[in-house]
Amino acid sequence: MSFDGAFTHAMVGELSRQLVGGRVSKINQPYNNEVILTVRANRKSLPLLLSANPTFARIQITDIPYVNPVTPTNFTMMMRKYLSGAILTGVSQAANDRVVHLDFTSRNELGDQVTLRLIIEIMARHSNVILIDLATSTILDTIKHVGSDQNRYRTLLPGGHYINPPAQDLIDPFQPDAAHAVESLVRDYPNEDVLTQELRHTYQGLGQDTGLGLAKALHQAGDPVDNFTAFFKRFDDPEPVLVTNDKGKTGFNAFPYGQEHVTSKNFDSLSAMLDFYYQDRAERDRVQQQGSTLIHVVRNELKKNRTKLKKLQSTLKSADDADEYRIKGELLTTYLTKVTRGITSITLPNFYNDEKPLKIALSNQISPSQNAQKYFKKYNKLKASVSYVNDQMAKTNAEIDYLDNISSQIELAAPKDLADIKAELQQGGYLRDHEHNQRSGKKKRRQVSKPEVFAASDGTKIEVGKNNLQNEKLTLHSAAKTDIWLHVKNMPGSHVIIHDADPSDQTLLEAANIAAYYSKARQSSSVPVDYVQVKKIRKPNGTKPGYVIYEGQKTLFVTPDREFVEKLSTQ
């Protein structure tokens, strides 16, 4: 299900019950298109997420942690100016559309009370968050500025007049008389799929799933008008459910629509359900946005090194033919008196191959002796290159493995992990580091972020490095020599430390599951995970961050389980 008008109605009800009367205590904008208002209500601090993300636009209370940028955006500063300490007086929806109004009362610089409205328009790539002065409908600021060159009907710029989105000539299904058209629709369109489309063309805010759920409800026994009323009444008392069909596609509903051939998972609130549904999707999108430079750099470096490896392999293959040049040089030297200057080729007996004749190309610009020396030079050059090429191939393969590892870490990273990866790429010279002291020329010291912490079922502490800097600090500096170290076998992944010298078999399996989940094998089954005491880990001199070698390990085979890993998390 999409975040349609009917689902928005249910969410507005949930937010009204939890937030109205609360005071805004914090305002942060951790991501470009998303702002979080922390509202203190009913003795709780509730982070309200307003997302204008083109793909995942929504409004909800979120428990997913976030990291704020060092410097707040202009929109954040404007929001703080007007809404810090403001009281939320109402949450409402515009005619069952995907537009939510958050009304506030606050005080201006003179101490006078003012009324403000924060509007979130959930409209795919046109989604926006807009702050207006309610008395005059003047736009104070927007999270996305929309000029006349982008939209001639309505500009969304500070100082402009707020115009509502174009209204559709459809019926609000939550109005008292909304069911008057139902009987004729059910009569005229007995086919469920056709009825679904007609309902969507008649009533405002029905996504495909909601339209189909309503069509099923209207076809049930009883009066269609009563069925219609009962269907929409359930949005006022939602039973959030996540459904997965037999093709593996997952969606969310405000309550069960009676779909067939689906598995379902129930939640206590709409917001908790959206956190679960969007966590991976939104995180991936945020990582793609914030880590776009890192992704671009790593991809380019990988492409460059793979091209270099192909050239080295070609050079090495050419070196396999070096003996042929030596043989030709020796034959020319042996039969030098038979070679006449000015000819372009000659066939001579090959005493290395049962006197089988060998045709040798010659340059007519140089003497026979110089032709022989030319072949010896080619031979010596190719033989000399073998050692160098093998050395370069080893270094290039190591570089490709390292960059593959970085690429996997970006794929598995949360937005807060990107800073460490960026710092590592800067230290390695892949990215320019602009954060340095201009006077002294010294780079600022940067603290490596803390690893993820988990607790095994018996309470044993388990830590996980999410990138190479965390991995190195965790394994080589933080862990005790008697702790147990785990890592997926022969592929990129996180370092995992069990802070116990003699963990139980159950704890080992749980830590191995975590190691498999935080690796490139996350989607695989029966993943091999090595484990060994930390004292048997060592880092060779001059190797890349996070690279270690070990011996004496044992191996477990596990299948990564996201829900299981999340249950063990302490964060």
Image: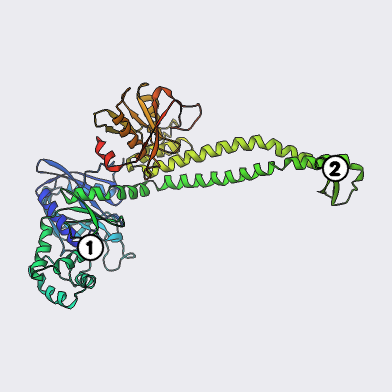
**How far apart are the two marked residues, 1 and 2, measured between alpha carbons?**
83 Å
Query: Taking 433 as reference, is 121 left or right?
Result: left
**Quadrant into which the C terminus falls:** top left
539 or 227: nearer the viewer: 227
Seen in the image, is 322 located left or right of residue 549?
right
| Front residue (pair 554, 301) | 554
Image coords of residue 259 (percent x, y): 21, 60
Under mark 1, the amino acid is: Asp
Q: Is residue 306 above or below residue 456?
A: below
Quadrant of the image occupied by residue 178: bottom left
Give the farthest residue toward the right. 337
Along the horizontal axis of the image, is 382 left or right of 207? right
Q: Position of residue 189 (x, y in %)?
A: 19, 76
Residue occupied by mark 1: 209
Q: Secondary structure at mark 2?
A: helix
Relative image position of residue 269 (x, y in whole percent) = 16, 49
**Could you tell me which residue is drawn at 32 percent across and 23 percent down?**
502
Residue 50 position (above or below residue 184) = above
Residue 153 appears in which quarter of the rendering?
A: bottom left
Residue 454 location, x and y as percent? 28, 33
| Residue picked out by circle 2 | 332
Q: How many marks?
A: 2
